[in-house]
Image (cartoon, grey):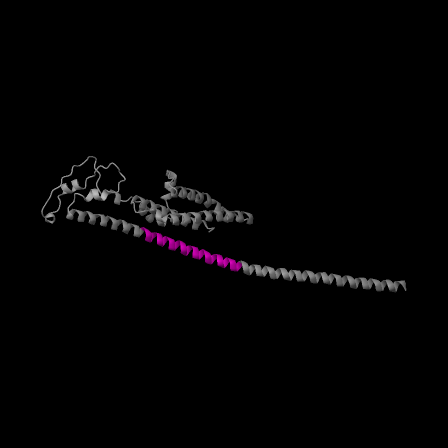
Amino acid sequence: MANPNQLYLLADHIKLSLLERQRAQSLEIGGDSNDGHISRSLDQFKDGLTTLESELKRLQEAGDEDGALNISDALPGLQKQYDDLTSQFHGFSSPSTTDTLTHPNDPSLSADFDHATQKPSASNSSLRPKTGRTVSKTVRFSDNPSSALPSPDLEAQLFGSRYRDNPDDTMGYRDETNDMNNVQIHAYHQRVLEQQDEQLDRLGASIARQRELSMQIGDELDDQVAMLDDVDVAVDRHQGRLDRAKRQINRITRAAGESKQMIAIIILIIVLVLLIAILK
């Protein structure tokens, strides 16, 4: 991959993958499952930079100043993007790397970047409203729990935050539902399912965009492979012509050498005949 445009497109693909990874981590739905794909993309980016440097040296030796200038102008920016994206992937964030991550190389992908950089409104880990003070809870018993829905005040009390000695305790669900009746538990589950459906819809849309971008990259790579095949065919054709011209030159050289020898022999014979005639 010795084309700067391809590397810019690959960099945008890695940026979107890192942004989606950050969104998944903020939603606590597991953003590390895509790390292998991002790592392979970074390795491909690095190999592309190495190939680009080799191509720059080749063009400089061949005297192609325009091609070398094009690559030399793009190479520092691509190297900086690779360093910043690698730092982001390994968790070393800074204002510079964040600026690189959130700005696409292709303006047509601005809408995708804007969507990927939007902060989620809620997550599964923050289903309860956070308040600045401890809210006391009041439990009201009823012989017919389905006869009436809880009032807003009672709902606020039931869903108020509760202090726990261990903030990482995984018993949050029991804390939420131990004082609820059946109707409240059903409403609570319904709300959780709706939030999960929304998050899955956003994740599905992100995966669809990633798939479309991957297909575009694949089409671009197929076009580049076809172009390289055409170049190889042209090089082979010209090499064959050069070989035929070289053989013809060798035949002409040998024929000229043989002609010179024949002329020299004839001249010597004439000289010899003249000498014999003179001596007689």
Q: Quadrant of residue 179?
A: top left
Of 103 and 66, which appears nearest the observer? 103
Q: Is residue 178 magenta?
A: no
Farthest right residue in view: 280
Q: Which residues are magenta?
A: 206-234
Q: Residue at x 39, y 49 (%)?
A: 36
Check the picture and name the quadrant holding the C terminus. Answer: bottom right
- Where is residue 129 drawn, in percent x and y? 21, 40
Q: Is residue 257 left or right of residue 105?
A: right
Q: Is residue 123 visible?
A: no
Of 259 and 54, which appears nearest the observer? 54
Q: Residue at x 35, y 54 (%)?
A: 211
Q: Is residue 234 left or right of residue 155?
A: right
Q: Is residue 162 left or right of residue 57?
A: left
**For residue 236, above or below residue 111:** below
**For residue 196, above or below residue 275:** above
- Where is residue 149 drawn, in percent x and y? 12, 47
- Where is residue 91 drawn, in percent x and y? 37, 41
Q: Quadrant of residue 223?
A: bottom left
Q: Is the stretch drawn in magenta largely helix, strand or loop?
A: helix
